[in-house]
Image (cartoon, rainbow, N blue to C red):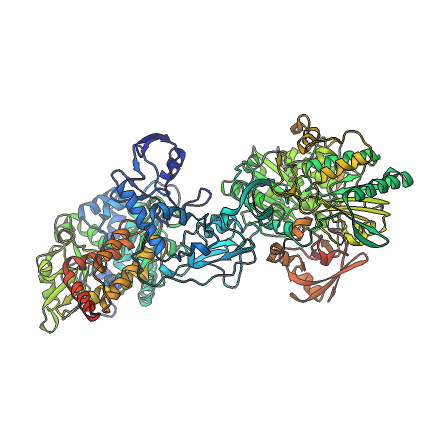
Amino acid sequence: MTVYVKGVVFENVNFEDPNCWRLEEYVKRGGYAALKKIINDKITQDDIIADMKTSGLRGRGGAGFPTGLKWSFMPRSFPGQKYLVCNTDEGEPGTFKDLDIMVYNPHALIEGMIIGGYAMGITVGYNYIHGEVFEAYQRFEEALEEARAAGFLGDNILGSDFCFQLHGHHGYGAYICGEETALLESLEGKKGQPRFKPPFPASYGLYGKPTTINNTETFASVPYIIREGGQKFLELGKPNNGGTKLFSVSGHVNRPGNYEIPLGTPFSELLEMCGGMRDGKKLKAVIPGGSSAPVLPADVMMQCTMDYDSIAKAGSMLGSGAVIVMDETVCMVSALERLSYFYHEESCGQCTPCREGTGWLYRVVHRIANGEGRPEDLDLLSRVGDNIAGRTICALGDAAVFPVRGMLKHFRHEFEDLINKAQKAKGL
Amino acid sequence: MLEIEIDGKKLTVPGGSTVMDAANSIGVHIPHFCYHKKLSIAANCRMCLVQVEKAPKPLPACATPVTDGMKVFTHSDQAVTAQKGVMEFLLINHPLDCPICDQGGECQLQDLAVGYGQSGSDYAEEKRVVANKDLGPLISTDMTRCIHCSRCVRFTEEIAGFQELGMANRGEFTEVMPFIGKTVNSEISGNVIDLCPVGALTSKPFRYTARTWELSRRKSVGAHDGLGSNLIVQVKNNKVMRVLPLENEAINECWLSDRDRYSYEALNSQERLTKPMIKQGGVWQEADWQTALEYVANGLKQVVAEHGKDSVAAVASANSTVEELFTLRKLMAGLGVEAVQAFARNADFSVKTQGAKWLGQSLEELSQNEAVLIVGSTVRKEQPLLAQRLRQAVKKGMALSLVNVHGDDLLTKLAGEVIVRPDQLLEGLLQVVKAVVELKSVAAPAGIDLANVVVSDAARAIANSFEGKAKAAVLLGNIAQTSARYAEIYAAAAALAALTGAKLGVPAVAANSVGAELIGADLGGNVFAAAKKAYVFVGVEPEFDAHNGSQALAAAKQAEMVVVMSAFQSCAMDYADVLLPISPFTETSGTFVNMEGKAQSFNGVVRPLGETRPAWKVFRVLGNVLGFNGFDYNSSEEIRDEALAGDTAARLNNTLTSAVAVSAKSAQGLVRLGEVPVYQGDAIVRRAPSLQATADAALATTVRLNAATIAKLGLVDGGKAIVKQGQGSAELTVKLDAGLLDDVVRVATSHPLTRDLGEMVGAVEVLKG
């Protein structure tokens, strides 16, 4: 269930209408006005990028890198093909926002990518869609056809000499393909494994050409920024945390779903919007930004506002905006066991610390969760984690370690209790 | 140039260098596994993590570009902690079965574990077990030991040209494996063993036969192609146990062909001849050297006396050393015999050049050409490392093209490829000549009639690839060199080189082809065409090492006297009168002159087996027995200095001494394409069991035809066919080869199955078997 509260990506979308995603409805909501404005008013590339910088829009995929700044890195005068890529390989456990954008408002993404192509002088784009949401891929292809037929996409857009080709591409469900360079490898038809950086995609990206990669929600926010101005977008949120953001709320709340709210909204308000805790249970902890974000205990979380800076200050990450809410019944060891299993399962196996370390982490947590824990295991977990984090080709290694660190920081006693029980059972 | 500091040492390095390059340049060792100077950077092992000032986390030295003013710490706490952390991860799933691992003692993981490992492990879980893979007869696998550095994978893709190994599955279940149901068949596959930093890939023939620290390492030179690869021959108890490359950037780089790596197995074979033998009354009897040599001396003297000096011919392998060929020639000259032939595989002896034919340039210069055309060559099998060298040059921009008689994949990008029938190789080359003449709007070269030549688009593409190229080369491969129309092909190639400003090069077929020409061991033409009364065979088996094996065998059988000097007993038992055991290249000192004209001397690495003697010593004694002057050499060095006296480089010259009339002819009907298979080239290789078990060796037992010819002849792919040529026939398995033209019948020469057939290229009949 998707709930629009006050936002830009789902601005005026009537989720009850099965045709709400169609071009006709999108245009009625003011869609493609931004593109028309650019073409008709001959707005310059520099102006667009300046507006993007003003907006304070930060990458919605998880890293939160300022989008305008990223766009300015693209060598606009590069002779030869450049590529624009949208990362819809949404695979972070707890995250399901891009899926709804694809299903309910795909044209916002398409328009955003066209504007991005215009701003950076790029003529070809790809949207890499997670393999496990095939219907979203199919809908995207339909939407692309509508945009092409209407002259918004393809050669000589809206009668100008600007051309932009956009293609859909679906992966096969590997989490690692959400890492932007693994995504590029996969898009090229190779095994999805991250590349080492540098070089970064802005200089050596898809097929070795300069490439800009943004998240679905990021692109879908662009039309609003161009139409209404970067300043207005910024003011929706708070300084350095411009605009609204989609939060995928899951777990023990009454109404899980996507909530698009201004950045800076207190977590307590978001929890209320979700109908509060299910069955009147007590809030125990929240993972505020997808499975790789360190868990925060209820008291810390209730003091946070939902924006990059506040969550970072509390010791976690806003990430992709996946809010996993856990009530008092949750065993944190079991929760970590499941998370660690995920990273063990999704490691691409390319570099040593992640390939060997994620399995080790999982096995130790699994051991503790199954009454086989040993007193030295918690120190071991910390040490193994320290040997993974910051030593790998991509961030998956870090992502596997953060949840471990978060759990041990805030819920160490639960691990110790299980280990003590195990020791007692063995008569030690 | 960038100024940086590594561990407090200041240095300047060129822009684009990595931290690893910079560290190597000042001799600072950074531990690593996946990094290899000849392979692309993978940065996956993470062993080379170092501390870089201002970087928040340790960075991989192999993949981090140097920036100006960078300060690197390779042994700081941060760096060593990271390196030790990686080592711990590498070891948790490594079996630590070093005592029974063939890599033990020469294992990078073992070595680095000394510095970066712990004495105990905190890993209490079950270790990973990975199923072994069948990579063929040369490479043994223990995949549980694999640390996933991907060197082998990158080697097959980047150096060997075709990715025969890949990383399957993900995470800790990642496995290196070949394509399902396939083995690794590259002609340079053994290099993955050297590249593997652990005992996952080891040598199958060598496995469990010795510990590395028991082996002495002795230098030698490759004896099976014209490259002159530098070798480390490893010896235990006077037995060659293993052969490894000795790095020489100018020749074999750090690589070795499988042929040079595994041929040593034959040196220890049961087929070795270890005592002189004389046939008396049709019965073979062992003899002492004195008796045998007197028998030979008297016999040869008698034949010359009775039938004249032209009734005797010496045929030597072009893999014989300079010293052997020189003393042989000197001995024959003493008898008055002129015919000393080290090129029995050739058919046309009318090419006369101003000096010894050679590559026309060094191997390193060859790599720097902007355009290269190879005429008539199965390059990968003839000169495996030359093919590799060209492959790397193509990546750097060389336009490589082929005029060839089959479509075998060189595993690199080609600028153009003209494929013709084997009896039309000249005509294929003339297409290119004419295309260049047309492109440049110049007159046809003197003596070359281009009137009937029809230029194909492929020939035009080749002509275009030479346009505006300052450095270019035209090379004649083994198929061109053994052609019955070699003189015309040579003249056409020389004309093409002149037109395009290219250098003409002749990559030597054998280890000492250039040396043989320098010494003049190329006389007598086809010594089997008109049979002689006596033959001296030095390291050759005429039925396999002559252009027309059945003709050579018949000539040997009718001769009154046949002296066979060989390291092996062989079917020479049928036709020889005396067998003299001579040293293979590992048991004698000697010199090979490689294709670039470089003389490389080497020592024997083991003592001669049994009563085997180096051939040059045998000739010395024979000279003395015969009472000839000038045979009192004390060492092979004395012979070498006499044989290669003066400026040998000045005696390398590919310029024709006189013009050759060249004209195109048409051809039709079934025609044999006979090549020497990669593992049949000489007496040693033929007896190396592991090489004989390879896919390449199996290919030599087939008759290959294209689909249309298979259909036309009523054959079935995989079925049997009988190939008839002259009086001989051979029953072979039919194999589809889509790269052949219609009516081309590709049947190996120099092979036991095809021994009764005739010349390499000629009319054949094919019947359903």
* Outermost residue to the bottom: A279
Q: Position of residue B489 (x, y in %)?
A: 71, 41
Quadrant position of residue B299: top right
Quadrant position of residue B99: bottom left
Between B468 and B718, the one nearer to me in the picture? B718
Between A331 and B620, the one nearer to me in the picture? B620
Q: Position of residue A55 (x, y in %)?
A: 18, 48
Task: Identify whether B39 is placed above or below B177.
Answer: above
Between B188 and A56, the one nearer to me in the picture? B188
Q: Position of residue A141 (x, y in %)?
A: 34, 63
Between B736 and A86, the one nearer to me in the picture? B736
Task: Identify whether B190 is placed above or below B497.
Answer: below
Task: Identify whether A297 is placed above or below B23.
Answer: below
Q: Is residue B170 left or right of residue B415?
A: left
Q: Is residue B405 left or right of residue A361?
A: right
Q: Is residue B540 left or right of residue B233?
A: right
Quadrant position of residue B628: top right
Q: Position of residue A306 (x, y in %)?
A: 13, 57
Does residue A128 appear in this view?
yes
